[in-house]
Image (spheres, rainbow, N blue to C red):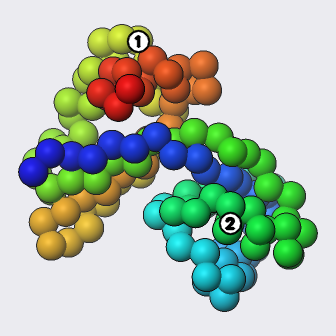
Amino acid sequence: MADTIRLLDYFYIETGDRPGEGARALSMLRDAGVHLLAFHGFPKGRRAQLDFVSSDPAAFKAAARKVRWKIIGPKKVFVIEGEDRTGALVDYFSRLAEEKINVTATDAIAAGAGQFGAILWVKPRDVKRAAKVLGIV
């Protein structure tokens, strides 16, 4: 089975870097019926950045407006899903490196049932070239 690579929109918010901020954000989205394909949170100075990749960006934006989040985006992220195997991302990283495209961040996980998933970010100026290198345009 071939991997699936999609170029999707993501949005982020900045929030306090305190216990419970992620739980509050995720609970609000759950209660609004917003389905997430990926979620990534990390410290940013004295604050935290929470990245959201939704299967329905319009629903995400509507829910965010309702609670008055100041969302940033849409921005672009690659979502890769496929059959789990040793070195599943090596070819993608190698192809991007050959074209001098830097991967600015990534998260990957063996998702169980023989599957893996990853999210991969490149600089905005490199998104179109990366999409071509990854074979999605």
Name which residue type carries label 2. Phe
Hey, which residue is sitting farthest top in the picture? Answer: 99
Q: Position of residue 130 (x, y in %)?
A: 42, 24
Q: Is residue 116 above or below residue 87?
A: below
Residue shown at 46%/40% (left/top)?
A: 7
Hey, which residue is sitting farthest right in the picture? Answer: 68
The quadrant of the image that shows the C terminus is top left
Give how far apart the Cα atoms at labels 1 and 2 are. 33 Å
> Which residue does the numbered mark 1 point to in the structure image?
100
Q: Is residue 137 above or below residue 7?
A: above
Name which residue type carries label 1. Lys
Q: Are marks 1 and 2 in contact (CB under 8 Å)?
A: no
Q: Earlier in the sequence, mark 1 or mark 2?
A: 2
Q: Nearer the viewer, residue 95 or 8?
A: 8
Dot 2: what SS? helix
Is residue 76 at least partly visible in the picture? yes
Q: Position of residue 87 (x, y in %)?
A: 15, 42
The mark total stands at 2
Dot 1: what SS? loop
Q: Is residue 131 above or below residue 30?
A: above
Q: Position of residue 57 (x, y in %)?
A: 63, 58
> Which residue does the numbered mark 2 point to in the structure image?
60
Q: Is residue 88 above or below residue 38?
A: above
Q: Is residue 82 left or right of residue 24?
A: left
Q: Is residue 124 left or right of residue 20?
A: left
Q: Position of residue 25 (x, y in %)?
A: 70, 76
Question: Toward which corner of the image does residue 29 lie, by quadrant?
Answer: bottom right
